[in-house]
Image: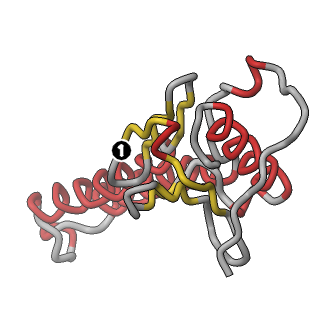
C-alpha cells in the first residue's frame, strides 16, 4: 500500500531543513568499490603475463583491461554524486542517470513505504520522481530524511 509520509508539526531549524540530502551508506560503498575496481583492473593490466612471458595478453588487451576498470570505477563513482538539493522554491534531484528540478507546488505527496528503497515525489501531473539520495539502507535516518522531505514539500506549497 502506498502511504504518504506525513510532515512534522514542529518548526524545524531552517538551516537543517534545507540541508542537502545524501545517503551515507549509499556513498561509502561505491567509493570503496570504485577504488577497488580501478586498482584490480589496473593490477590485471600490469601483472598478467604478456605474449613474451608465456601469456596471451598483448598491449591492446592491457589497455582494454585498464579501460574496463576505469569505466566500472566511473560508473560506480556516479553513485557518490547522488543527492537532492532543496531550497525555498523546490528541489533539484540528481539520481544515478537523470537529474531533475521539481518545484514544491508540483508535489502532490512524498511516498516512502514498505519495501521501497527510496522515497518518491508523486507529482500532480501523475509523474513520479525517485529521490535516491534518501536510501532505506541508512536505517532510521532514512525515515527522518523522508519526513524532512515531506515537511519541505508542505512548506513549499505542495503535498497538501
Q: Is 144 situated above or below 1? A: above
Query: How would you rate the neighbour count of disc 1 (Cα within 10 Å): few for under 14, some for 14-19, many for 20 or more?
Result: some
- Residue 29: percent from left, percent from top: 61, 55
Direction top: furthest residue: 15
Which quarter of the figure has residue 71? bottom left
Query: Residue at point 78% right, 53% down?
Result: 6
x and y percentages locating residue 69 in the rendered image: 33, 57
Quadrant occupied by the N terminus: bottom right
Which residue matches tag 1? 99
Identify the residue at horizontal 30%, vertical 55% (top origin). Answer: 46
Q: Nearest the camera: 101 or 40?
A: 101
For this rendering, which residue is in front, 118 or 127? 127
Task: Answer above or below: position of 50 versus 132.
Answer: below
In the depicted structure, whether residue 83 falls above or below residue 65: above
Seen from the viewer's position, the closer of residues 135 and 24 is 135
Q: Nearer the viewer, residue 98 or 47?
A: 98
Count up the numbered dots.
1
- Residue furthest out toward the bottom: 1
Q: Secondary structure at mark 1?
A: strand
- Which residue is painted at 67% across and 32% down in the image? 155
Amino acid at each position: 500500500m502506498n502511504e504518504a509520509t506525513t510532515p512534522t508539526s514542529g518548526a524545524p531549524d531552517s538551516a537543517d531543513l534545507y540541508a542537502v540530502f545524501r545517503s551515507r551508506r549509499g556513498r561509502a560503498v561505491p567509493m570503496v568499490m570504485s577504488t577497488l575496481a580501478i586498482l584490480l583492473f589496473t593490477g590485471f593490466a600490469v601483472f598478467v603475463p604478456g605474449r613474451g612471458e608465456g601469456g596471451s595478453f598483448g598491449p591492446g588487451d592491457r589497455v582494454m583491461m585498464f579501460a574496463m576498470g576505469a569505466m566500472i570505477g566511473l560508473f560506480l563513482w556516479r553513485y557518490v554524486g547522488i543527492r537532492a538539493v532543496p531550497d525555498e522554491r523546490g528541489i533539484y534531484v540528481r539520481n544515478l542517470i537523470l537529474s531533475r528540478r521539481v518545484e514544491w507546488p508540483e508535489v502532490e505527496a512524498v511516498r516512502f513505504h514498505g519495501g521501497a528503497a527510496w522515497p518518491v515525489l508523486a507529482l500532480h501531473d501523475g509523474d513520479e520522481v525517485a529521490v535516491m539520495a534518501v536510501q532505506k539502507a541508512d536505517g532510521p535516518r532514512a525515515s527522518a530524511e523522508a519526513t524532512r522531505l515531506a515537511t519541505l514539500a508542505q512548506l513549499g506549497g505542495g503535498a497538501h
